[in-house]
Amino acid sequence: MERYKNRILFGTDYAQNKQMYQAWWRFLETTDDYLPGPAGWRIYALGLPDDVLRAVYRENAQRVLNWQ
């Protein structure tokens, strides 16, 4: 994700609620081990750096949608 950070947009088709966003934030922003995965298996968080998070969360969408 770091190498291709300018090609990734954040999106989800899960219901919009606080718990859903907290789960994504924890997965993308922390280095926690053994998070509960969507199908019951455990996954590792990514701990992405701030520049990647900014691109994925906001900057890429602004560029693609011409919202600058």
Image: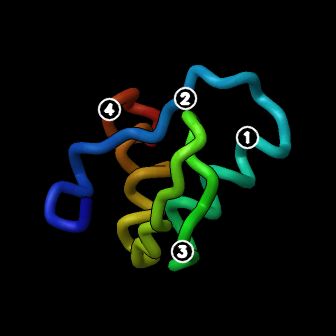
Between marks 2 and 4, how big is the CA–CA gap?
A: 17 Å
| Amino acid on which disc 2 is placed | Thr
Crowd around label 3: few <14 · some 14–19 · many ≥20 (10 Å):
few
Based on the displayed image, in which of its 4 quarters is residue 29 positioned? Answer: bottom right
Query: Disc 1 designates what residue?
Result: 20
- The numbered dot on residue 33 is 3
**Foreground pick, 11 / 64:** 11
How many marks can you see?
Answer: 4
Sequence order check, earlier mark of 1 and 3: 1
Query: Disc 2 designates what residue?
Result: 12
- The numbered dot on residue 64 is 4
Question: Element type at marker 3?
Answer: loop
Image location (x, y in percent) of residue 40: 59, 41
Image location (x, y in percent) of residue 48: 41, 72
Question: Element type at marker 2?
Answer: loop
| Amino acid on which disc 1 is placed | Met
Do callouts 2 and 1 mark residues in contact (Cβ within 8 Å)? yes
- The numbered dot on residue 53 is none
- The residue under the point 55% across, 60% down is 27
Between marks 4 and 1, how big is the CA–CA gap?
A: 24 Å
| Amino acid on which disc 3 is placed | Asp
Crowd around label 4: few <14 · some 14–19 · many ≥20 (10 Å):
few
Image location (x, y in percent) of residue 51: 38, 72
Sequence order check, earlier mark of 4 and 1: 1
User: Relative to 29, does residue 68 appear above or below in the rendering?
Assistant: above
